[in-house]
Amino acid sequence: MPIRRLVARTSLTQLEHRFAEIRSDEGIHEERSAGVLAELARGGRDEEPAHIEGKRDDLTDVSFVTIDPEGSTDLDQAVLVEVDGQGWRVRYAIADVAAHVVPGGAIDTEAWARVETTYCPDERIGLHPLAMSEGYASLLPGQRTKAVVWDLGVDAAGELRTIDMRRAWVRSTHKYSYEQLTTAPPKDAMQLLTNLKKLGDARRSSLARAGAVSLPKPSQEVVRKGDELTLEFRAGRPIEDDNAQVSLLTGSAAARLMLEAGVGVLRTMPPASEAALQRLRHQAAALGVEWAPDESYAHVLTTLNAESPRGAAFLTAAVSLFRGAAWQPFDVAGGMPVPDPVTHGALSAPYAHVTAPLRRLVDRYGTEVCLAHAAGRQVPDWVVTALPGLGTAMETGVRRGSRVDRACVDAVEAAVLAPHVGEMFEGVGLDSNTVQLSAPAVVAKCSGTVTVGRRQHVRLVSADAATGPKFEAAS
């Protein structure tokens, strides 16, 4: 029987009902309450709400730019990186969501129920109303917008040396996409790209010295082009990682301020245990992945070919080391101790989420802690009283988002494969019951004898939109 290699395409129209059903099952909807609509009608004003403390500077003359996926309009971040002596001055403008959300109000209450923006192939359901998150609170080019601006000094070795932050008015000058900056960067972006690359290299070296680890695992994505949906395995572009380094740097700065203040919410993850590392070494040996006794697993991951069968299987096994991440609030004065460990295991350093407040609930609160400490003020009561419930809320919301994402991918996989039930495909065994196909870009359950880290023939047994495709190993 011939082995199939499919171009993975299906119609969005065919799956819209299923996507809506997935969201409905999880209680996710775009409809907003009357209270939210009333608050929106008063949104976007220049005057500050009563709960916002301190002055707002005018930084509209700073040439901030945004760098995001193609088509994004919920723009949390705008950046400017400049050479400063032997290092860099990094200014990072973050949408000032707290200036648009009244604590305890309707938008705030809905945000706690939603927790994060939900992205589906057919639409995105915002954490905040779209008129806010893609309108007056977004760092859209040419728009005078309220922001929180981080001003960070980084030395030539990539180490964070100085931290300043303030509320400000900003006006971003350009809206770039990752694709544009990769394939056809405009001349006016070349200096920024150079500075981002050099800063990114320095920060990656700094993180590596600290023992940080990243998984170079291609992501499985549903890509929409008009009414057509495709499945792709895509490795991150260099510019994406360079830009991410600015966010990681800012998260490290935020964690430092929180720990100084004795109050905040950290993103933590326990380090890999010796038992887990030993198990991964055994798996590496079984797969034929070279791992010298004196090498760290961080070094092994940097040398791995993620596109090879052995590499793909090893990366799947390595995911077991990246478990236990949590959002952990603390308030030493209020009797909530600092987390132990205080670090994020993948970064080998303390870290906090503060750079995506339009899309993620916790960032608004972390930012307020940092602003207060940087200004020498007490953290506002509305922030302190919210901290105890933040970790649980985030965990619940992110789990829900993960279920939605997986169900949507399952539906697309099933739609692509449904006409080919009973046919043979070539897949790579990722673990004892999971295979990865390259054409189409599918990861699915497989019964029978799956040989981990090897290519083998598998038969498509079923392709149900509700449960995803199922395969069996060919005998």
Image (spheres, rainbow, N blue to C red):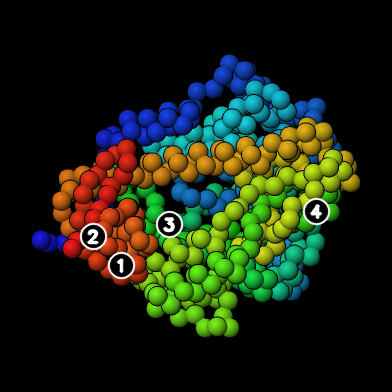
Front of the two marks 4 and 3: 4
Write the residue at 56% across / 38% down: 397
* Residue 259, numbered label: 4
Precedes in sequence: disc 4 or disc 1? 4
Q: Which amino acid lies under the numbered mark 3 shown in the image of this protein?
A: Ser
* Residue 473, numbered label: 2
Precedes in sequence: disc 4 or disc 3? 3
Q: In the image, 388: left or right of 200? A: right
- Spatial separation of the CA atoms under disc 4 and disc 1: 47 Å
* Residue 163, numbered label: none
Q: Which amino acid lies under the numbered mark 1 shown in the image of this protein?
A: Thr
Q: Name the residue under label 1.
A: 451
Precedes in sequence: disc 2 or disc 4? 4
* Residue 219, numbered label: 3
Residue 205 horizontal/vertical position (percent): 63, 73
Precedes in sequence: disc 3 or disc 2? 3
Q: In the image, 316: left or right of 458? A: right
Q: Are marks 1 and 3 in contact (CB under 8 Å)?
A: no
Front of the two marks 3 and 2: 2
